[in-house]
Image (cartoon, rainbow, N blue to C red):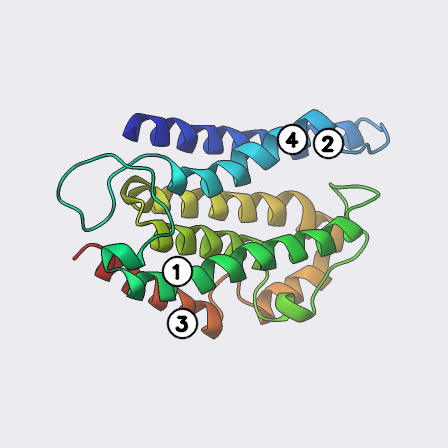
Amino acid sequence: MLGVQILLCLVSFAGVGSYWWYFAMEKRRRSLGFPSRHMPKYLKVFLTVSVVGVWFVMPFLPQPVLGDTSGVLVAPDLALAAKGRQFQAALGLPLALCGVCSYVVLMQRNAKATACDYASPAQLITNGAYGYVRHPVIVARFIGTSGIVLVTGATYTAILLPFLAMTLFATAYIEEKAVLEPSFGDIYERYRQDVPAFLAKPVVIVMLVIFTGLTFLSI
């Protein structure tokens, strides 16, 4: 089943590549004088599944549970109390709920700013969560996925979390270079100088919690 996890990870990287390709094509269209257009629905679906969905599914696929040396492949579940993992559940469940719920709320807010043109937002959002980090959606996704990994004890997905981080960093870079900097210029540059991309103090604390939970899971 590790092979399935790696395959899904590669699908995620393909989604990031498609994300870059879309913005590159939109830039070319505009340079040729064509009007902007909405992101095609098929591409939205593919990006949602490949870049976001697979990482929320991977922790629930059959795989060894962290800390279990039997090597048995199981479908991780939420019944951690029976396995003596109440501590990990106490850490992971709030992170999972907070991350997933924050992701949904932030995406709804982003949808309003990009309703007319995904490649050229109507406004630069700088308040709320965006006043602490420039990419709260990405932070929420990492926290949510890591929380699910803590709850399920998904060994293979935990090993692949650095690759999730890579896709998230790449997504943030694409959005800044292809959308935000061209759309908002000096305004975004001032915002970038004042607000960190990911690691505000609250995020650092959450990352330490995740690290602590993963450490205990491996014992």
Element class at badge 3:
helix
First in residue order: circle 3 vs circle 4: 4
Q: Which residue is mark 3?
A: 205
Kind of residue sitting beneath label 3: Ile
Picture coordinates of residue 9 (x, y %)?
A: 41, 33
Residue 92: image quadrant is: bottom left
Residue at the spot of label 2:
26
User: Which is closer to the viewer, label 1 or label 2?
Assistant: 1
Residue 167: x percent and y percent?
A: 46, 42
Which is nearer the N-term, disc 4 or disc 2? 2
Q: Which residue is mark 4?
A: 45
Q: Residues within 10 Å of mark 1 (few under 14, many from 20)?
A: many
Mark 4 vs mark 2, foreground winner is 4
Q: Are marks 3 and 4 in contact (CB under 8 Å)?
A: no
Q: Is residue 83 visible?
A: yes
Q: Left or right of 152: which side holds 54?
A: right
Q: Is residue 52 above or below residue 92?
A: above
User: How far separated are the C-alphas under marks 4 and 2?
Assistant: 18 Å
Q: Residues within 10 Å of mark 3 (few under 14, many from 20)?
A: few
Q: Earlier in the sequence, mark 2 or mark 3?
A: 2
Along the polypeptide, which appears first: circle 4 or circle 1? 4
The first of marks 1 and 3 along the sequence is 1
Where is residue 31 drawn, in percent x and y?
78, 31
Give the side of residue 107 with respect to residue 73, left or right: right
Q: Is residue 205 left or right of residue 45?
A: left
Rendered-image quadrant of the N terminus: top left
Residue at horizontal 61%, vertical 50%? 176
Q: Earlier in the sequence, mark 1 or mark 2?
A: 2
Q: Residue furthest left?
A: 69
Q: Which residue is mark 1?
A: 92
Amino acid on which disc 4 is placed: Val
